């Protein structure tokens, strides 16, 4: 009887230890699952922050690029206007020079014609 009593007590204690181990195991699994979920949420938050920072940097670079593009376009337009103004001055000078050359040529021909007439009058 004593042995059965001891066995019963030992089995009860063993079952109690098993129950406690199962409860501890369940608790640890629950804690592990919660930790995984928290870690996943934290990683998603970090990823979102990184994406936001990356997008902000891309937008900043894009704005900077657009500003530089605008500056270069203005510089190009100014250089083009200056070039066109210089070309207009050169064109005007060329027209004046061409007209002067034509006037000189005409006067020279007129002088030759007059000289030939006067020469014929002398003969």
Image (tube, rainbow, N blue to C red):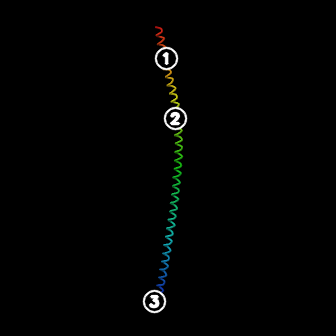
Q: Secondary structure at mark 3?
A: helix
Q: Which mark is residue 9?
A: none
Which residue does the numbered mark 2 point to in the structure image? 84
What is the residue that sits farthest to the bottom in this orientation? 1
The residue closer to the viewer here, 37 or 71, is: 71
Q: Secondary structure at mark 2?
A: helix
Q: Is residue 39 above or below residue 90?
A: below
Give the mark nearest the N terminus, 1 or 2. 2
Give the mark nearest the N terminus, 1 or 3. 3
Q: Is the Cβ of the residue at disc 1 closer than 8 Å to that at disc 2?
A: no
Distance between mark 1 and mark 2 Cα atoms: 38 Å
Q: Nearer the viewer, mark 3 or mark 2?
A: 2
**Residue appearing at x 49%, y 70% in the figure:** 33
Query: How far from the left and from the top, in percent, is residue 119?
Result: 47, 10
Query: How far from the left and from the top, in percent, is residue 17?
Result: 48, 80
Which residue does the numbered mark 3 point to in the structure image? 4
Which residue does the numbered mark 1 point to in the structure image? 110
The residue closer to the viewer here, 80 or 43, is: 80
Q: Nearer the viewer, mark 1 or mark 2?
A: 1
Q: Nearer the viewer, mark 1 or mark 3?
A: 1
């Amino acid at each position: 009887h004593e042995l059965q009593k001891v066995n019963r007590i030992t089995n009860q204690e063993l079952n109690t230890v098993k129950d406690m181990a199962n409860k501890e195991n369940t608790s640890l699994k629950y804690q592990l699952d919660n930790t995984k979920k928290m870690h996943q949420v934290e990683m998603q938050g970090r990823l979102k922050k990184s994406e936001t920072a990356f997008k902000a940097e891309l937008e900043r670079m894009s704005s900077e690029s657009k500003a530089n593009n605008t500056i270069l376009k203005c510089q190009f337009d100014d250089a083009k206007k200056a070039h066109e103004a210089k070309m207009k001055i050169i064109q005007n000078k060329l027209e004046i020079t061409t007209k002067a050359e034509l006037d000189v040529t005409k006067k020279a021909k007129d002088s030759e014609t007059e000289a030939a007439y006067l020469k014929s009058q002398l003969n």
